[in-house]
Image (cartoon, rainbow, N blue to C red):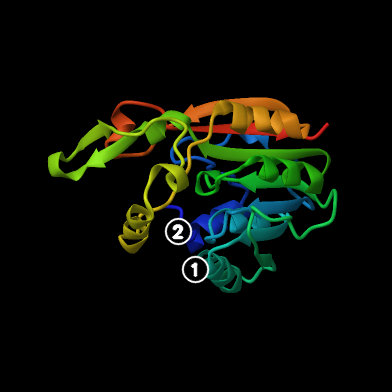
Amino acid sequence: MWTVPISRDDYKRALDGELILYLTPSKQIPAQWFPKLKGAKVLGLASGGGQQGPIFSAHGADVTIMDLSDKQLEAERMVSEREGYSINIIKGDMTEVFPFDDESFDLIFHPVANCYIENIQHVWDECYRVLKRNGTLLSGFCKEELFMFEFDWEREPSIVVSNTLPYNPLKDLSKDEIDKRIKDGQAITFSHTLEEQIGGQIEAGFSIQGIYDDRDRGGVFAKYMNTYAATKAVKP
């Protein structure tokens, strides 16, 4: 779902004032979590794909999208050209120093993505650095307990408790296993504790002002448990 660009009809509804955005699969972000968007400088962090950027642009924001995926960035570019608005598109790695000056943005939008990197404190520190004072960070993330399980495709749709926590494939899997997963098109992901996720934002200097749980829209996990969370944090 995170790779399907916004439709022309959805973009037109955003132009008419509709504000529907997701940090996690199912729950819409509360409207009160957003600052004033008209004229705001917004960074979509690891959020390429032509989904959120167009909506922020439709609401009058000055939008920058940073992502590592060429395909996601190309989708972002395609929608902006289709709808005729300007957007700043940057290929960047969130594990490195962000290519922005201090206090550059009013809002950072960071949907589920930090499960793809091993250490996330750097991300929170960089978000804090590039946000203006009173700037807002909206982030979504996978909950740690999700990583205890593996799918047993021989007994679909069953789930098997397989992994100890914290889960780090670079330490828990052999190179051959990692190579096979990449060859099979499977994601290499890492678990992160609430201490790393929420505590890490607090350590960076943020004030946490909102949180909610969420789950997938379908599939085996959706029936049993919340596997995602989203937070609103503000730079004092």
Label 2 vs label 1, nearer the camera: 1
Q: Secondary structure at mark 2?
A: loop
Q: Which residue is mark 1?
A: 71
Q: Are marks 2 and 1 in contact (CB under 8 Å)?
A: yes
Question: Compared to 125, does 184 lie above or below?
Answer: below
The picture places residue 192, in percent across and down from the top left corner, at 53, 35
Q: Please tell me how crowded label 2 is: few (under 14), some (14-19), or many (20+) other residues with Cα within 10 Å.
A: few
The picture places residue 114, in percent across and down from the top left corner, at 56, 45
Front-most of residues 195 and 28 = 195
The picture places residue 97, in percent across and down from the top left corner, at 73, 55
The picture places residue 35, in percent across and down from the top left corner, at 74, 39
What numbered label is drawn on residue 3? 2
- Count of labels shown? 2
Question: Compared to 181, does 169 lie above or below?
Answer: above
Does 49 sit left or right of 149 as displayed? right
Does 224 sit left or right of 215 as displayed? left
Measuring 58% from the left and 70% from the top, which residue is drawn there?
A: 77
Measuring 63% from the left and 59% from the top, which residue is drawn there?
A: 93
Q: What is the three-letter code of the residue carrying label 2? A: Thr
Measuring 79% from the left and 53% from the top, which residue is drawn there?
A: 39
Front-most of residues 77 and 71 = 71
The image quarter containing residue 11 is bottom right
Front-most of residues 142 and 14 = 142
